[in-house]
Image (cartoon, grey):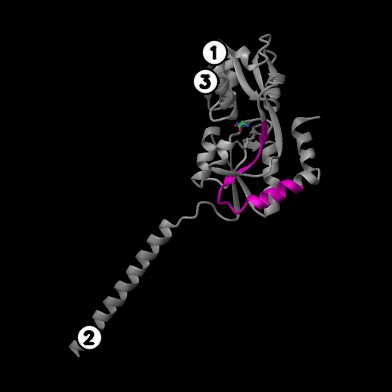
Amino acid sequence: MRKSKSWVTKALIFALTAIIMAGCSGKQESGQAEAPTKSTKLVMATSADYPPYEFHDTSGGKDEIVGLDVDIAKYIAKELGLELEIKDMDFNGLLPALQANRADFVMAGMTPTEERKKSVAFTETYYEAKNTIVAKTGSHLMKMEDLSGKKVVVQLGSTQQSAVQEAAQTIKGIEVTPLNKIGDLIQELKSGRAQAAIIEDTVARGYVESSQDLEMNPISDNGENAYAIALPTDSSHVEKFNQAIKKLKESGELDKLAKKWFGK
Ligand code: ARG
């Protein structure tokens, strides 16, 4: 009797230990394999300092990120039957965030350069812009050569930074300072700490129209910037995104959205 009791006890302890161990190892595994983003959601990373493509709208009493890119992203998410979530960060942090799985795609008026294509995939392009020189009214800075001897601000990590740094290799005396936000560039110009900023035309226009002390001049010889959406190289979404962009263009919806955000 005694013997069999201890045998039963041992068997019970064994079984319990096995259950507990299984529970532990199960926990460990699920802890390691954390999904980056939920599959019902599409996470967009952007730099919301770029009106009219993406910017903070606080006019309705609450802070909302809106713009042409946001409307296009909403259209694509709807086509894919997914919910859109937007994460705002510095432009320079967008591609690292994408590569670290902190977003499903990047949409930020981003130009698909050869350099960027080495680390991420891009969709078809959906818009185009040109570089301009923004400066205090009356400066008449028309081309890169005119920036000699000037302090020039650009957005950190942008194609404008590459463009002016490349120009500075042959044109003497261009002093380039990269900054995080487009709003910072405008502040530097207005305060006189910088004499020029390189900004894309549609974005520059908004700032120049709302401030009498600023003017803009397109740089004719340099900088055609098309915009595309960046996705991780292994993303299964690229094809679906391209199909949605095609539909957006062919249906005339993109023209409607452009009218909404650019006026005429
Ligand atoms: N098109 C330029 C680039 O790709 C500038 C984009 C800046 N976008 C922004 N949301 N601030 O580098």
**Labels 3 and 2 touching (C-beta < 8 A):** no
Residue named by callout 2: 5
Hey, what amino acid is under mark 1?
A: Lys
Residue 244 counted in the magenta span = yes
First-in-chain label (3 vs 2)? 2
Residue 20 counted in the magenta span = no
SS at circle 3: strand
Of 39 and 23, the residue lying toward us: 39
Give the quadrant of residue 90: top right
Residue 28 left/right relative to 245: left
Residue named by callout 3: 177
Residue 172 is labelled as 1
* Residue neighbourhood size for the residue with mark 3, other residues' Cα within 10 Å, grouped as few (<14), some (14–19), many (≥20): some
* Cα distance between the residues tagged 2 and 1: 94 Å
> Where ligand 1 lies, by quadrant?
top right
Hey, what amino acid is under mark 2?
A: Lys
Residue 128 visible in the displayed image: yes
First-in-chain label (1 vs 3)? 1
Residue for point 53% across, 52% down: 37
**Labels 2 and 1 touching (C-beta < 8 A):** no
SS at circle 1: loop
